[in-house]
Image (cartoon, rainbow, N blue to C red):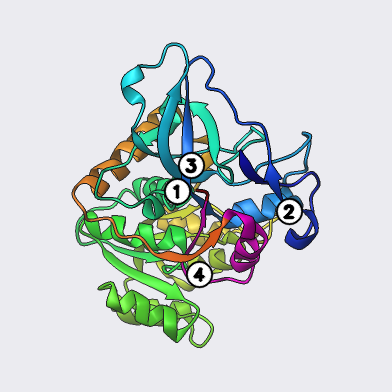
Amino acid sequence: MQAAWYERNGAAQDVLQFGEKPTPEAGRGEVRIRVVCSGVNPSDVKSRAGSRPVRDDYIIPHSDGSGIVDQVGPDVSTHRVGDRVWVWNAQYNRPYGTAAEYITLPANQAVPLPQDVSFEAGACLGIPALTAYRAVELADLEPGNAVLVIGGSSAVGYYATQLVRARGARVITTVGSAEKAAFMHDAGLPDTVLYKKESVAERVLALTDGKGVNAIIDMDFSTTAALVDEDVLASHGKFVCFGSNNRGAVPVNYATWLPRSLSLHFFLVYLLTPAQRDRAVQGVQALLKDGTLQHHIGPNFALSDIIKAHQAVENGVFGNVIVNCQ
């Protein structure tokens, strides 16, 4: 099969290769998927760059993707052959991800993709949509609540804004440019904060008549935690975080958090419990089936252009980067 891989960590142009690798066979409890589209996430390029050192002969990157089941192993119903599917955690704790013509996975990691949802959209779902679902679940929202989503035009953020609205809450989101603000406005989300040009705290408090928000959904704890000291998070509010650019110590002002009964929730989408994962997958599936979940599909690249795909993500291209594997 054709595949992309790297044998050592480093810059995309230095380590990524494209060529032939053995076609896998489905083992017990597994399905083999003919990959149509592979999604490229920031975590994929960080892993290749060195956040996850190579400990195998080679790594086929990418955790997300979509395709068609073309083979099943023992203990899997043959009725699954021909299923359109999207996948999650395809390259977590395993060397071979979705940047290839074929991949084998445990059958439960291949989730049916509705007929009216494109393979490109299916490749966007795994990490971003499941992260967004768990974040909104932890926010424990009620209708009428207000939520600040940090980076609302990002892959996770865009799904999170939709899930917040689906729960009847108001969305305020930070964005980095006028282009991204316009994108959010076109999506029916007018309450944007241009964080590079204006005070996030002042803008959020103005939008909420000084009350603050009931939850913050955050992608960078190292910079966003300070908003709590500026009264952005209302009493009994929830701070939900799934990332931080600074992985070292980040100060939290106990005297600010305790009197307002604030709570802090960290999580990693790769390490959800089976029950949490099932709720997230089924929740995303329900939104896919009723057509309310929108996707921001960005540039498409051929598998042979894997280097350009990784560089696009590193350069902050707008939208989910897709690699076509067939």
Q: Which residue in the rendered view is the most extreme toward the top?
A: 75
Cα gap from disc 2 to disc 1, whole angstroms: 27 Å
- Of the two numbered discs 2 and 1 on the same chain, state the one appearing first in sequence: 2
User: At 35% across and 46% down in the image, what residue appears?
Assistant: 137
* Image quadrant in which you'd find residue 170: bottom left
Q: Which residue is mark 2?
A: 16
Segment colored magenta? 303-324
Q: Pick whichever, 113 or 81, lies toward us.
A: 81
- Residue drawn at x 60%, y 62% is 309
- Residue corresponding to mark 1: 131
Say whether residue 210 is visible: no
Q: How far from the left and from the top, in percent, is residue 191?
A: 32, 77
Position of residue 144 measured from the top left corner of the image (x, y, whole percent): 20, 62
In front: 95, or 244? 95
Q: Quadrant of the N terminus?
A: top right
Q: Are marks 3 and 2 in contact (CB under 8 Å)?
A: no
Disc ID at residue 227: 4
Look at the numbered disc 2 and give the secondary structure of its residue: loop
